[in-house]
Amino acid sequence: MPSRGTRRYIMRISTAYTAIGENAETTHEETYFFMINFLLNSRMESGFPSNDEYFDEDVNVYISNLLTSLIYAQHHEMLQKYLTLDDITLSERVSATVIPRTKYMYYRTNADYLLTSLGIFNNPKRTRPSSFQYMKLSGKSYIGRGKAYYNLAQSYALETFRKTTAIGEVMGKLSVGFEKYVKILSLMKGEYFNIYKKFSNGEMYHLERSIDEIKNRGKLQSLYDKFLDAYSRYRQKRSTDSKRILRKITAEIREIDPSFRFSIE
């Protein structure tokens, strides 16, 4: 497990990707600036400030660069060949190569995907809302995969570079704190990316009912007050008009509260 005393290395392998279009360098730098600030703010707001358990400012840099790279198509095109959606296929592809760097890229790419898909998009299986639920793994299963993939990426990074490297240490820290970083990104997506879960029809129905109930409580109180005034007026005058008003208010109360009983006869 990483510790505060862990030696700090200069990251020689960049996780940044070049933006497309004019003034690309400025665009990338500005995007990265927003990402790192959003991430740092999210860490504080979620109760996981930087270096809370061990030095992980290098993880901040890695995640910010990863989020920045997601904006650019080149990133997806370059890493698509390494991405798989199940353990079996990933294991088969890793077993089919003897090159440690390729194994490292397989595990790192899939771990990065799980981190962002769980934290930002909440859809690691890339399914549609109408997909059958019984085919989906639980969130804990995907978290377990993410931790394992980063751990294996750290092992193959060591085998690839034949020494401890900054990127290898980052992989290890992401493995150890995977759940924490997912929680940080989950807060970040709502507070800074404005990405919120879409309500299902059932959830929307219950939400609307709850709002209606709150409105009706206030309306009922007003109707009860009107009823007492109308009843008092009716007892005093016994007129046709006061009787009509009393019946009207009684009917309005029953529309909201069917259990209300009153007979004017």
Image (spheres, helix red, strand yellow):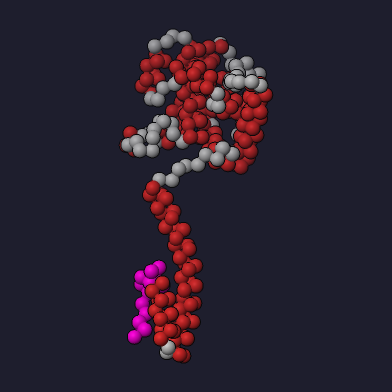
Looking at the rendering, the stretch of residues picked out in magenta corresponds to 253-265
Residue occupying image coordinates x 50% and y 17%: 78
Which image quadrant for residue 22?
Answer: top right
Residue occupying image coordinates x 41% and y 84%: 243
Q: Does the magenta segment cover residue 153?
A: no
Percent x, y of residue 202: 38, 49
Closer to us: 144 or 245: 245
Q: Is 260 placed above or below 207 here?
A: below
Q: Is 123 placed above or below 224 here?
A: above
- The secondary structure that dominates the magenta segment is loop
Q: Is 73 placed above or below 250 here?
A: above
Outermost residue to the top:
98
Residue occupying image coordinates x 46% and y 23%: 110
Q: Does the magenta segment cover residue 261?
A: yes
Which image quadrant for residue 23?
Answer: top right
Percent x, y of residue 153: 50, 20
